Amino acid sequence: MSRSEELEIQRSFSPNWKVLEQLRTRFLSENFSPKSYWDSTEVLNQYDYTFAQRIGWKWDAVLSELQETRCFEDLQSATLIDWGCGTGIATRKFLDLVGHRFVNKIILLDKSQLACRFAQESILKKYPEIEIETNLSKSKLEKRILLVSHVLNELSPAAEKELLSLIETTVLVIWLEPGTPASSSKLIEYRERFRKSFSVLAPCPHQEVCGLLKEKNSANWCHFFAAPPSQIFRDSFWSEFSKRLQIDLRALPTSFLVIGKSPQKNTGTKRLIGRARHYKGYSLVLACSLAGVLEEKLLKRDSKQIIDIIDKNRFATWLP
Ligand SMILES: C[S@@+](CC[C@H](N)C(=O)[O-])C[C@H]1O[C@@H](n2cnc3c(N)ncnc32)[C@H](O)[C@@H]1O
């Protein structure tokens, strides 16, 4: 579905602000609660038209980057697992953007059975032929791709353990979280845990210890900015959503980690972390490379071309 089609459907959606505000409060809460907030199809529906769309735009950015780096080239006949699937936005984006030709079967896992059913129906609406299960099969022979999206602040220690042991059985893991210092730090912890048994495919341009773990980088965190569709800035619903829930529509900060069994293809490059800071005559960038995470000063007169690239605010900016 194209972005303008998505927004077209949105126009027929009737927001329930009380439900949306409650969800927002729940997502911002740092306290772990074992109780599921998916207590009706209405709550799932409200989420799917709003928060899930914003998460979907982040998936657009990450999956496009992975396609550019030919990350899916070696995949065939895989089982796609969406852990903590919610309404299934991660799976739908994967099927829409990467295509369902790689996927034999989908497994939707969530502690809420209501969410699993909702996700299953929303996927089948568009892909009626696809096989979907809501339990993990015992077979270790299948080639598994794991999608994980926005679950970190809800994980109990037992759930985290279960998820990390599931990773051991996969060939590709794509994990997206909000671009906060806390998410970044957790994903870096997982990167360090898995980087010897997997290739680190993104966002890092190298396989060595993460440069952000150095003491001098303690104030920095690994995050990037996805772009929402430009139409939302002219859309009365999204404007109201932004005002009521105090969400800045322009910013979609994302932390993510992609690890897999195939070799990384963009090793040796340098990637911009976060956004560049522009000053009169120069810009400061935080650049990640094999040499570590270093702040660089780019003088406009010397690096006009580079600063033009940075100004485009792409999700992935590669520096020379
Ligand atoms: C914020 S929602 C994100 C949903 C979806 N992944 C997305 O990106 O839109 C977090 C999801 O994780 C699920 N979840 C939380 N703890 C879980 C657990 N222990 N096992 C499975 N799912 C869990 C919740 O039920 C919820 O659907």
Image: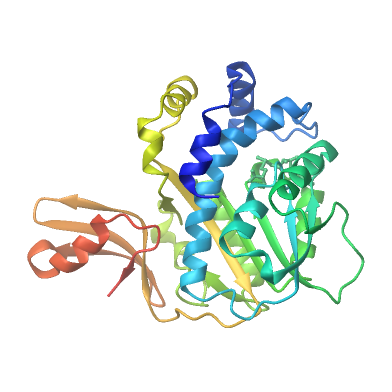
Q: Nearer the viewer, residue 149 or 276?
A: 149
Q: How many marks?
A: 0
Q: Quadrant of the C terminus?
A: bottom left
Residue at 64%, 21% in the rendered image: 19
Give above or below for 186 relative to 36: below
Q: Is residue 314 left or right of residue 33?
A: left
Vertical order, 156 against 105 (above or below): above
Q: Quadrant of residue 135?
A: bottom right
The colouring scheme, among rainbow, by chain, secondary structure or one colour, is: rainbow
Q: Nearer the viewer, residue 78 or 136?
A: 78
Q: Residue at x 24, y 55 (%)?
A: 311
Q: Position of residue 224 (x, y in %)?
A: 42, 54
> Which residue ends up furthest to the right in the rendered image?
138
In percent of width and height, residue 201 lies at 54, 73
- In the rendered view, tell whether residue 108 sits above or below residue 196: above
Q: Write the residue at 36% across / 42% down.
A: 230
Residue in the image at 75% along x and 74% along y:
77
